[in-house]
Image: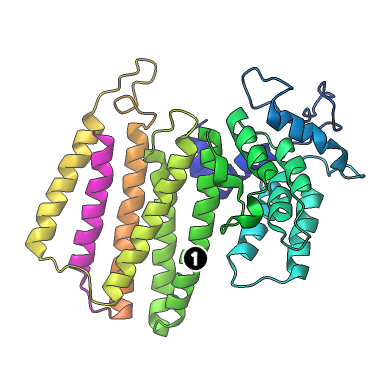
Amino acid sequence: MPRSTFALCRAGLAALLLGALSAHAAAPGAHGAAPGAMPYPNTDGFGMHFDSGEDWHRQCMRVAHLAPSRTYAATPTAEGQHTKATDLYYLKRDQTSTTAAKWSRVREQAQALGDDAVLMMLYANGYGVARDTDRAIYHACRLDAAKAEMEARVDYLASGSVASDRQPFDLCDHITSGRMGGVCAAIGEGRDDRTRRARLDRFAAKLPAAARQPFARLRKAADAFAQKSADEVDMTGSGGAGFAYRHTGRRDKEFMETLFKAAGGKLARASAAQLERLERELNAQYSAVLATPSENENHPGRIHYLTVTREDVRTTERAWLAYRDAWAAYLAAARMPTDLVSVQAELTRQRIAQLRKLSR
């Protein structure tokens, strides 16, 4: 996966991963798919032999007749299409209550986009429709998944355990592959990000008028740093995307926690001398990371054995400096009970910890 993929946009990578889960399938029962179509069951992601006599396969073929009478919409070409139904599904699921009419809207959108993951969850959980395990199995069989994921999902649905389980059946319940780990990390961070943004919006609404623009600039700088910091994540292997999503989520969480502690006067106090010592430590750590030689002769600009390059670290550092500096105008306007030196000391400690992980 090119390193620029994640840096461009968190949602863009989510679209790429989620889109792969709901590929346009061939007619039920067809093992030889037409060009550009997937077989049913969708075994293209297996990468290994399977036996048509296996339980999961028999279950898939048992429900093949439940294919909708009309074909799904063609696979969307614009990035983000498949995430629309997924985002809407989790938005409604995370609400305190959702009406049947709203769940029907989710189903309509999922059907229009051919989002089998969402349709599987709707029928398995009975959201806006009568619970229909067989239809859930049908949509599970269309997903582009690792063999172990397909087996686990189908077997669990066929067992009838969904009705008695206290937790809703979820796409991410049976992940075994790094790629699916990335999909679920994107979903999880998207849900967490929605909660964080709602809390930050409520916080912003209570600020003095003079502090709102500086706070908006601070949030923008914090978000830019969080996204850019994903370039410091090693993308080796299929799990790289998941690590990157979790990494940006941690940066977002650090910002919010630092903000709320500063607002409540609960951030550890630091002196100018302490900040100076931390800055020297940061500079030493930064220099050590940049001085780490590459172990890949084809990529001399990389650090150690990682996919992270020295330029990735430099540009992330610049984004962090802009984020750190944005605190000054905000603190001055908001009249927080925490001084700038203490905030900068906390941010510097956080940055040191991030760079240490690169030099291990």
Q: Is residue 331 inside the magenta stretch?
A: no
When asked about the image quadrant of residue 330, the answer is bottom left
Query: Outermost residue, left direction?
Result: 273
Residue at x 30% of width, y 61% of height: 325
Residue at x 47% of width, y 77% of height: 202
Q: Amino acid at mark 1?
A: Thr
Residue 271: x percent and y percent? 10, 66
Residue 140: x percent and y percent? 70, 41
Can see residue 88? yes
Give the position of the C terminus as an image quadrant.
Answer: top left
When asked about the image quadrant of residue 38, the answer is top right
How many numbered marks, from 0 up? 1
Can see residue 9? no
Identify residue for label 1.
195
When asked about the image quadrant of residue 331, the answer is bottom left
In depth, the one of 186 and 2 nearer the eye is: 186
Q: Is residue 285 left or right of residue 304?
A: left
Please determine whether, in this image, residue 327 is positioned above or below residue 45. Answer: below
Q: Is residue 125 left or right of residue 95?
A: right
In depth, the one of 152 and 23 nearer the eye is: 152
Q: Is residue 346 inside the magenta stretch?
A: yes
Residue at x 39% of width, y 65% of height: 218
Q: Classify mark 1: helix, strand or loop.
A: helix
Q: Which residues are magenta?
A: 337-360
Please determine whether, in this image, residue 1 is positioned above or below residue 216. Answer: above
Please determine whether, in this image, residue 214 is positioned above or below residue 281. Answer: below
